[in-house]
Image: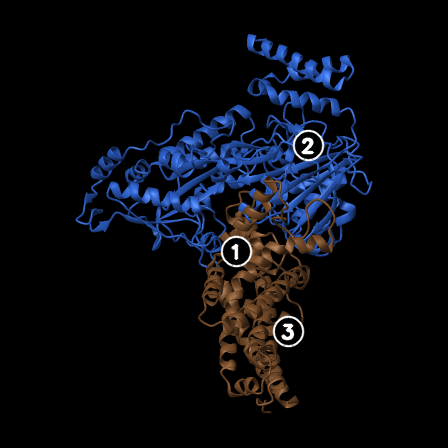
Amino acid sequence: MFRYIVKRLLISIPVLLGVSLVAFFLVQASGDPMAIYVSNPNISSEDLIRLEKTYGFDKPKAVQYFYWLRNTLKGDWGQSFLTHQDVFTMIGERLGNTLILMFTSLLVTLTISLLLGIYTATHQYSFSDYFVTGFSFFGYAMPTFWFGLMLIIIFAVKAREAGLPYLPAAGMYPIRGDRNFGQLLLHLVLPVTVLSLSSVAKYTRYLRSSMLEVISQDYVRTARAKGLSERVVLWRHAFKNAIIPLVTLVMLDIPFLFSGALITEQVFAWPGMGRMYWEHANWVDYPVLMGIILLVSSLVVVCNLIADISYALIDPRIRVDG
Amino acid sequence: MSKRAGLIVAMLVVASLVLGACTTPEPQVIEKEVEKVVKETVVVEKEVEKVVEKVVEVEKAEDTTPKGTVVVGVWQEPKGLIWNIFYDAHANDLGASMYYTPVTTDENDELVAQMLEEVPTVDNGGVSEDGKTITLKFKPGFAWHDGVPVTAEDYKFTWEFIMDPATVSQTTAGWNMIESVEVIDELTAVVTLSESYVPFVASTLVFPILPKHALEGVADPGNSEFARAPLGNGPFVFQEWIPGDRIVVKANPDAPIPPKVEEIIFKFVPDMNTLLALLRTGDVDVAYDLRETQIADIVKMQNVEVIALPGLSIERYYFNLRDPQDLTQPHPIFNDINVRKALMMGMDRWSAVSGILQGYGEVAITELDNHPWQNTDLEPVPYDPEAAAALLDEAGWVMGEDGIRVKDGVRLSFRHSTTAGNQVRENLQLLFQQNLKDIGVEMIIDNYQSATFFGGCATDGIFGTSNFDVMGFTNSPASIDLAQEWSDFFLTSSIKDCETNPAGSNAWGYSNPTLDEQMACALNELDPEARVECIKAAQETIYNDYFTLYVYDRLDVFAVSDRVTGVNPTVFGGHSYSYAEWQVVE
């Protein structure tokens, strides 16, 4: 097992290098970091040329990549061209906020999907099965920016105007007033609803099919034949086996929790990673973009490894070979 | 006093008496207030109800301790708070709460001294006869928020700081014209320019001074603590910056002109629609830099007033006068002035304004629309498809079989490029595409992400390599005076060429010796009247060359909740010149 882990980690080094190379050139190909200043009448062309030199944009891209790689290997993730801050600091400022949002919505998504998945599997082809399936796809297909805005208008604006209890429209904490845990929960409701509704479909469908597969297995029939109650059959025998594939699915999704939700964070003014990525992507601020990409791709590698190992732990039939 | 004004005054007296009866203040006070209000008859004529509110406000103003919190919705977070390193309009607007400036603009958009005793001019001896020496006399009483007085040394340091390459200034505009700064005493500095540069007073003295004692010797200031928690000298003191969320400033009790609100929260809301929702719920009190297309929504909101000023930002289309395939050659289509004129006459900008912009905007005419120096003799290029077609016929472009004109085997077809993802710009393109098709011209929409569109030489950007037929974007003169950079778009000497002149901004290859002279005069002529004549003539020259189509004048759109008074936005000062005057009415 130990050898296996070491081997996997060693393989991940060229993988990450490859990712960084491709990402660097893709990001660079998306435009000119100096473009933000061109139409600003107070920044002269001489200023532009001077800045270009300072930041090394006049150097060939391969050279720029090499500089970036060398510094990153030394543990220096570089500075943003826009904010001049260390990329590491910037990620630190936003990561916590994003994780609060993303893990809450994952938790909500999983809870709902588990219940719906089992329900639809045990009531296959019933009206409620079709209804739940239809509804979850409706949520999946809803454009986030539009749905988010509708929720804001209904629950934050209209409800307030009608004198009903209302929810905050945006941000993590109230603009005026105390920042406390209760307020944070209130501010989480709308963005978490948007995020969960769009991912419930995926998990529900997955769990439904996995559950259906397990229910038709011989050992479930045996359990029923033994005279066990349906509840025990479902939860003790079927469910435990049905969630194994889900563990992988969740594990593989975790890295993307760190990168945040681009549109949701934008619409709800959530001060997270997704919004930061978006703001800096518009102006090709590549140290920031590369920092986030590298963080997420490293997590992909690690989480893949964890998924494989935990698979072996949950399901004794699967072995990892050294 | 006119009859009408008299009537209104009478109504006011009645109104105040009624009001007075309700609140029973001292009768004397009311009379004084009425007098005050009378001075503002222009405002009064519009809305009598408003004035009643004003009377209430005056009563409250007796207590001068700052009160209440105002929330400003900002859709673009500043990158940092040292203005020359993180130069953008929103950061400057926000920074103005924390910094006074040597000169500024007032509620009438006139240049007034703020930290200086008076605005330096040739007449008052502040500017020398040759225009190269400027004497700055600071008023006493200005101090940094840590209590250290602001001195002429700080001014000298600011210049050194901006010009130091290690600072990595984004802008050095104007400051790069300074040859030396001599500190005569604590409150007097003499600035010597390397050559006469008339816009210096109005364009460069409007920027904040930085504290020497806090910034001297700071390595990498852009990444310093100061950049995220600045030390100012203005009406408000920096309080906190929560990244991605807000910046909070608190009233400075020692300010020479103390502010009236206790706290301003600049709340960052990147999505415009969310910002409007917060405005509607009353979470946000003031919003600015909104879009014309949002006005209709804001007008519907109760308790929110929308103020739309005809601004200086003009959406314009530049015709490339060089062949994008080979910049040494003239453009195969646009080289002919009559073709350019015909295309301009073929685009229905009036329908664009009334339809796409819902009437919120004006068809543009010159580079300096709505500026005091606008050449008002010029009329907008008319929409006249028949005359346009006739011009094209005359120029030898005959209708081809596919409905597109041809001349010597060249189809009258061009690419029209702007920034991708901007709904208004894209709708304008669709309209003009149809307009031009009607006169036998093919317009191909070819848009790019901003970072590619404005990209320079190093990244083969559209702007950098002049790889476009028509390029559309918005630009404006940056300040109340014309900064040097204004002329860079037009001068022969700044024609862009990645090999010989990568610093040039004239990517369209426009060249006219007459304009070059007029622009030089615009920057160097010391006689104010002669100078304005040059500036007006320059507008006419550009106009007569039919090489830039000024599409429409954008509106500066502000939304202000009725619980806040005193914002009174102006064209040059925006909302940020008046922070100290803001007041909360509960």
Are the residues at dot 1 and dot 2 in contact (C-beta closer than 8 Å)?
A: no
The N terminus of chain B - image quarter: top right
Near mark 3 (Cα within 10 A), the count class, few <14, some 14-19 or many ≥20, is: few
Q: Which residue is mark 2?
A: B582
Near mark 2 (Cα within 10 A), the count class, few <14, some 14-19 or many ≥20, is: many
Chain letter belonging to callout 3: A
Q: Which chain is blue?
A: B
In front: B79, or B283? B283
In front: A302, or A79? A302
Residue depicted at 53% across the width and 59% down the height: A284
Q: Which residue is mark 3?
A: A73
In front: A92, or B507? A92
The disc placed on residue B227 is none
Closest to the camera, between mark 1 and mark 2, is 2
Q: Residue furthest front?
A: A227
Q: Is residue B318 left or right of residue B524?
A: left
User: Count the marks: how many?
Assistant: 3
Q: Give the Cα separation between the discs numbered 3 and 1.
A: 26 Å
Chain letter belonging to callout 2: B
